[in-house]
Amino acid sequence: MNILITGGNGYIGSHTYVSLREQFPHAQLVIADNLSNSTVKALDNLKKIVQEEILFHNIDICHEEILEDLFSKHNFDAIIHFAGFKAVGESVDNPLKYYNNNLIGTLNLVKLCLKYDVKKFVFSSSATVYGDRVSPIVESLELLPTSNPYGETKAMCERILMDVAAINPEFSVSILRYFNPVGAHESGMIGEAANGMPNNLMPYITKVAKGELRALNVFGGDYPTIDGTGVRDYIHVMDLAEGHAAALAHLKPGTHIYNLGTGKGTSVLQLVDTFQRVNGVRIPYEIVGRRNGDLASVFADVSKAERELQWQAKRTIECMCRDAWNFEKNYVLI
Ligand code: NAD
Ligand code: UD1
């Protein structure tokens, strides 16, 4: 099997490379990434983990001719498509940057799949496409508008893939809707390298633990949840990575949508408590007002992925907190 991993040098893509190598030891894995949100250091560390040279191409997938050149040289069997921008706030401030990168990249890939007869496609989507729904969330729910352009790009890419699969009976698409990926490879060599001010909870906690930020602002203490703080379905990035290998192994014609989460909700304060306990560090926090657009409680129904992909998230919240901190405390940006 010959697999193209777009955005394979990023947070989730690099962990997925590790899982694919374990699951498909003889596959040829090719990364296409323009390093717009990842570093050469991450690539070097990935090489050390998998102990092999990596077929890496520094290309922008929005550049159709360059991407076509790659397709013409490799006989790809499958695409795993991570490349895209993902910061919700930035997408509100700069919608065209998001519509351009996320849509053009996906359109180019799909066109070239049809032209070069690549029949398997795995797409990184997000639970954000569900909008405001009561949890646990099942895949069959109709999508609601999301509150930001990033979420809209995910919903549009899903639609493009579904429509193309509908008229190309051999095209097999797996849409993976991630809940909240956190943690890092157990080696601590690859992880989520947040540049600048982190937007998401776990990278913020690790920066506070490191002393780079003074205290965590907990957005809202009056939600109808166990302790008043927001509840989410955190999933260890290695479990998520293994979910991609399972999705690829079980691909079948048509479009198939899977939630990748644990099915369990954890509140902000529960996550902070666990982080402090397993890592022996203190996380000062204060409860502030709610963040615009946040929901009280979001967690997945994961029964479809368990049933059809024979995949289940195994790693605990303790493991997520330990591995996130193990990566952050060793991580130096270059
Ligand atoms: P990331 O930013 O760490 O990785 C994305 C990679 O794609 C980066 O290495 C970046 O350099 C590359 N890239 C971006 N645009 C490109 C382009 N035009 N051409 C080539 N390379 C390009 O992000 P991630 O957290 O690994 O997320 C991967 C995918 O999963 C994204 O599509 C994201 O929207 C989706 N997703 C992420 C989360 C999350 O919490 N991390 C949740 C849901 C969905
Ligand atoms: C966010 C994105 C979502 C994306 C997901 C990826 C928003 C509105 N949504 O989801 O589109 O798919 O990341 O993982 O950005 N929190 C704090 N203090 C902080 C940061 C977060 O209290 O400094 C709280 C939030 O209010 C929320 C929880 O922590 O209750 C998780 O937040 P976050 O990590 O940003 O993820 P989501 O909001 O679920």
Image (cartoon, rainbow, N blue to C red):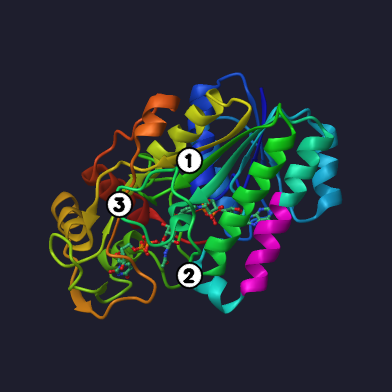
Q: Considering the image in quadrants, where does the N terminus appear? A: top right
Residue contact at pointers 3 and 1, CB within 8 angstroms: no
Q: Are there few (<14), some (14-19), or many (20+) residues within 10 Å of tag 2?
A: some
Going from N to C along the chain, the mark reached first, 2 or 1, is 1
In the image, residue 114 lies at what x, y percent? Answer: 79, 36
Residue 297 lies left or right of residue 129; in this view the side is: left
Q: Is residue 56 magenta?
A: no
In the image, what residue type sits under mark 2?
Answer: Ser
Residue highlighted by disc 3: 135
Residue contact at pointers 2 and 1, CB within 8 angstroms: no
Alpha carbon distance from label 2 to label 1: 29 Å
Classify mark 3 as within 8 Å of ligand 2 or not, answering yes or no: no
Which is more toward the observer, 271 or 291?
A: 291
Give, as a single range, the part of the protein colored magenta.
95-106
Which is more toward the observer, 328 or 71?
A: 71
In the structure shown, which secondary structural element does the residue marked by tag 1 occupy?
A: helix
Residue 79 lies left or right of residue 126; in this view the side is: right
Q: Which mark is residue 15?
A: 1
Which is more toward the observer, 147 or 40?
A: 147
Q: Which mark is residue 147?
A: 2
Look at 18% across and 73% down and name the residue there. Answer: 221
Going from N to C along the chain, the mark reached first, 3 or 1, is 1
Marks 2, 1: nearer the viewer: 2
Look at 36% across and 56% down and name the residue there. Answer: 328
